């Protein structure tokens, strides 16, 4: 009985000998795979597509991180509202006063302290179970500044001065001063300076991405005129006004009514309601607002 395996080969050779040369060439080429030219063409096309899609993908990721940041801000303020409602004097979260002190909240000499200052006030929201610890980390700061969630040091946020890595991304204001709040029992208005639900207007900014002039753990302010980026390059005037969390492009700002707004110029003179970092107050270095509309979020 003749072998059966020779017939397909014989038929193939017969067909190839009767094919036009161009068809024969393509058939042999496909049988052997792609040519180098074709492979390089495909690689080039893929490279072009990647170059076109990468910026769009990067923008989408950035926008998603900023939306997550805005959600954090809204949730933290919501926690502060619940905290104030649970307090007999309707006070916003505040650090415990010094022994013998009649004024709750951070004092002007330690507003940047992670335990005794404004960061300590925010930590009360975690301690009282009104906010989860993860809310205090801006996702873009996590990416751009290497901020990361670490274990809290007791009841306070942690901060590594050598690396700048922190568990807190946001600036907060715990005290507002208004001359009209002075009373005979409190002639200096110190007690009235504590933010309470009944005195804080809904439009007042109370939380935002970290102030570019402040450093966690410190009470000193950076020189506004000479602010630099992480590479040590001087920033433009507009960039100096914005938070480093979002590469100085802008910041999420949360107000007492729990509204959150993205602004790209924190000190635009044409929009004083967005003036959240700079202060015209002579008490700027003390970290206390002079008037209700004199916004100053620290640290």
Image (spheres, rainbow, N blue to C red):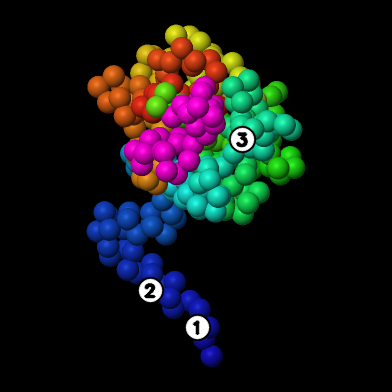
- Secondary element at tag 3: loop
Which tag, 1 or 3, sits closer to the chain's start?
1
Image side of residue 203 versus residue 217, left or right: left
- Secondary element at tag 1: loop
Which quarter shows the N terminus?
bottom right
Residue at 25% from the left image edge and 22% from the top image edge? 270
Q: Quadrant of residue 118?
A: top right
Look at mark 2 in the image and give the residue it sits on.
Answer: 11
Q: Is residue 102 above or below residue 237?
A: below
Q: x, y (%) of residue 247?
A: 45, 28
Image side of residue 271 versus residue 120, left or right: left
Residue 260 in view of the camera? no
Q: Quadrant of residue 275?
A: top left
| Type of secondary structure dominating the magenta stretch | loop
Q: Quadrant of residue 45?
A: top left
Compare residues 248 and 191 and report the one nearer the observer. Answer: 191
Residue at 64% from the left image edge and 24% from the top image edge? 110
Q: Which range is magenta? A: 181-208
Distance of label 1 from label 2 (alpha carbons): 12 Å
Image side of residue 176 versus residue 166, left or right: left
């Amino acid at each position: 009985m003749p072998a059966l395996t020779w017939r397909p080969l014989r038929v193939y050779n017969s067909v190839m000998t009767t094919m036009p040369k161009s068809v024969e060439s393509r058939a042999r080429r496909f049988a052997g795979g792609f040519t180098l030219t074709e492979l390089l063409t495909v690689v080039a096309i893929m490279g072009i597509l990647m170059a076109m899609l990468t910026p769009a993908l990067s923008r989408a990721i950035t926008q998603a991180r900023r939306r997550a940041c805005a959600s954090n801000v809204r949730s933290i303020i919501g926690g502060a509202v619940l905290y104030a409602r649970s307090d007999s004097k309707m006070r916003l979260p505040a650090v415990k006063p010094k022994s013998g002190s009649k004024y709750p909240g951070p004092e002007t000499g330690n507003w940047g302290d992670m335990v005794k200052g404004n960061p300590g006030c925010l930590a009360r929201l975690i301690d009282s179970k009104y906010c989860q610890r993860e809310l205090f980390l801006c996702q873009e700061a996590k990416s751009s500044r290497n901020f990361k969630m670490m274990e809290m040091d007791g009841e306070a946020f942690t901060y590594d001065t050598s690396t700048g890595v922190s568990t807190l991304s946001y600036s907060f204001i715990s005290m507002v001063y208004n001359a009209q709040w002075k009373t005979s029992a409190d002639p200096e208005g110190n007690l009235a300076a504590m933010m309470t639900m009944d005195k804080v207007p809904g439009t007042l900014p109370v939380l935002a991405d970290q102030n570019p002039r402040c450093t966690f753990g410190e009470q000193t302010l950076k020189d506004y005129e000479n602010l630099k980026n992480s590479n040590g390059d001087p920033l433009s005037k507009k960039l100096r006004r914005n938070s480093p969390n979002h590469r100085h492009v802008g910041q999420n700002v949360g107000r007492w009514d729990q509204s959150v707004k993205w602004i790209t110029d924190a000190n635009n003179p044409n929009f004083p309601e967005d003036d959240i970092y700079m202060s015209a107050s002579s008490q700027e270095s003390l970290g206390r607002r002079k008037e209700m509309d004199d916004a100053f979020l620290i640290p």
